[in-house]
Structures are given as structure tokens and as C-alpha cells.
Image (tube, rainbow, N blue to C red):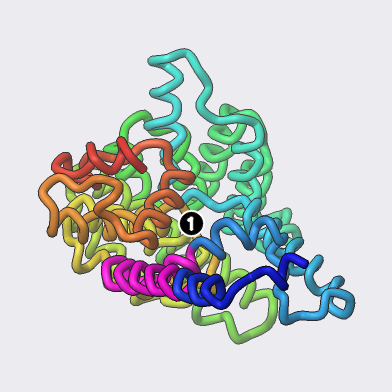
Amino acid sequence: MFLNTLTPKFYVALTGTSSLISGLILIFEWWYFRKYGTSFIEQVSVSHLRPLLGGVDSNTPSNSNTSNGDADSNRQSVSECKVWRNPLNLFRGAEYNRYTWVTGREPLTYYDMNLSAQDHQTFFTCDTDHMRPADASKGICPIFVMQKAWRERNPQARISAAHEALELNECATAFILLAEEEATTIVEAEKLFKQALKAGEGCYRRSQQLQHHGAQYEAQHRRDTNVLVYIKRRLAMCARKLGRTREAVKMMRDLMKEFPLLSMFNIHENLLEALLELQAYADVQAVLAKYDDISLPKSATICYTAALLKARAVSDKSPVPTATSFLPTQRLQLGRAGQWLSQLSLWCLPAKYSSGVSREV
């Protein structure tokens, strides 16, 4: 009955109204794309509608790919909860202990210490070390002593074991432990790392010549390589902490060229921080372009540096940018970095635009 009472004028008005609304949406979509470089409808769909739908692809049959979807979601949750190594870790003796002396609080938890102990055993020991328990008594190489030292929970026991190893012979890992935990200043730590470098280079050259003689020698060479890279990286960090930032940058670049495949120490993240301190933003962009791969898991340094460069791009165009000055993709990266870091370093983010960003992002 209702449809029979409608006149042709109603259909004309309905068609005109729908055409007007469609035209307004089209004009707004065109204006938004010209200004921000992205589709407003697509952004709203991805940001608001997709979470409500559970992120399910409508083109994919839900019954046939249920197990695959569960596996993908599980992998995503695991990657988001991954424990990421901190490449900017401080020295236990020269920095963490000083914090304890001043505040009376322990900055490291048992969980932190356990993770560090696992890394030390992975980097500085190998499977063949347990085959040579007599080395400590013979004085050939006190590897066995240091193997037990890295497993000690008591800091004083570790330091005592390192001194015991040095009494037997000059051992690079013993110098590393003393530089990390016994040295009370960065200057003292640097001196110990230089001694470790001298001993580590000797062990590296010897194992390099023997690495093709069997699996045992190859494992020892990998261990000596890890020790050498760790020492050089820590020396570069000491140089930066002592104000020799350009020297630190050169050391890190040389280290990355010498060992390009050894990425587990994340030396590029130390390099990014040093370049940011020098305000060499073109070099930062070059390093970031190499390592900011969407297929790789993101670290706090990578996310923050990408957001910083986005903020600088906006600041060059606007004297005091606000949150509305940023593109949606830039606001997304800034918010993503804010989830990693609670505050922005002023030397990384100059004051002329840090106030606008930190206040509104």
C-alpha cells in the first residue's frame, strides 16, 4: 500500500538526494587524498571496521582456513611478546651500580640478570669448552674457569672467578667481565676492554687458522668471533659515552663492514643513536632504509627513529607543528614509537617541535 502511494516526484527527489550525497562524499574523498595521501574510507575501514570483524578477510573461506588463521594469530601474538635484546644496555659496574649507590634501588631484576647470563653463555662459551676441564690447571687458556663464572649468580663470585682466570693466563672474557661489573667508571671500563681486545685478537687469529680442521675448531672460532665483536662494540659505546661520538661512529661502521653477517648484537641500533646525537639525519635515514624492513620484527630504536624522521619532516614545513600537521601515517608511527618509549629525548627531538609532538601524540 505504501509503495503504491509514492509519486514520481518522490523518486526524482530520492535520486537527486542520493546523487548529491555521493557527490559530496566523492569531493571529500578527493580532497582528503590530495591533502593526506591516503583514502579516508580505507583508513576508517581498516582502523574501525576491521577490528569489529575480527580482522577476517571476506575473500577467504572461513571454514577451510580456520587453522591457518589461528596459526597466523598465534605467530603474531608471539612476535609481539618477543623479548628484544636491549642494544643500549648499560654497564653494570660503571652505571647500574652507581644508580644503586645514589638511590638505594636495584635497577636490575632477577629476570634481567637471567637474560644477561643466557646471552653471556651463548656469546662467550661453546660446546667444546666442557671437553677441556684441565685447561684451568695447565694454564693454557682459562676457558673452563670463565665458563663457571658466567653461570654464577653472585656478582662477587663472578668477579673473583675472573681474577682467578687472569692469574692463569690473559683471557679476553675475564677482562670483559671485569669491565662490565667491577669497573666503577667508563674510563676504567674502556681500559679493561682495550686489554680484552688485545687478548681477543690473539685468540681470534689463532682460531681463524684452525677453523677448517674440524667442528670443534669451527665452534671455537665462532666463539672467538663473538668475543671480538662484543669487545669492539663495547669500546665504541665507551667512546660515545666519553664524548668521542665521531670516533664511535667510525668504529661501528668499521665493525659492520668487517662482520656484516653478525647481526645478533644489533650494532646498527647503536650506530643510529650515535648518528642522532651528531644530528646526521641523512646518515640516519640511510641506515634506517637498510634495516627498517617490514618483514623484520621492529625494535624500539627502529620505531622511534622512524617516527623522529617523520616529525622532522613536518617540522621543516611548519614552525610549531601540532598533531593535525602530521599525516595519518606519520601520526601512526609517532604513536607506535610512543608505545615503546614513554618520553622523547630532547637531544633526539629538538625543542622547537618536541613540545607540540609530545603534547598531542
Is residue 27 in view from this perspective? Answer: yes
Q: Is residue 21 magenta?
A: yes
Q: Nearer the viewer, residue 49 or 55?
A: 49
Q: Position of residue 241 (x, y in %)?
A: 26, 42
Point out the stretch of residues depicted in magenta.
18-43
Q: Which residue, given by chain and number where applicable, does mark 1 sit on?
A: 299
Instruction: Give the residue displayed 24% in from the left and 53% down from the top.
Output: 325
Answer with the quarter of the image where residue 266 lies.
bottom left
Which quadrant is home to the N terminus? bottom right
User: 10 Å neighbourhood of mark 1: few (<14), some, or many (≥20)?
Assistant: some
Instruction: Give the residue displayed 82% in from the left and 80% down from the top.
Output: 61
Question: In the rendered view, does 281 fall on the left or right side of 130?
Answer: left
Question: In the rendered view, does 239 fall on the left or right side of 174?
Answer: left
Dominant secondary structure (helix, strand or loop) of the stretch shown in magenta? helix
- Does residue 34 lie above or below 148 as drawn? below
Q: Nearer the viewer, residue 85 or 171?
A: 85
Q: Nearer the viewer, residue 161 or 328?
A: 328
Instruction: Give the residue displayed 88% in from the left and 80% down from the top.
Output: 64
- Does residue 110 lie above or below 21 as drawn? above
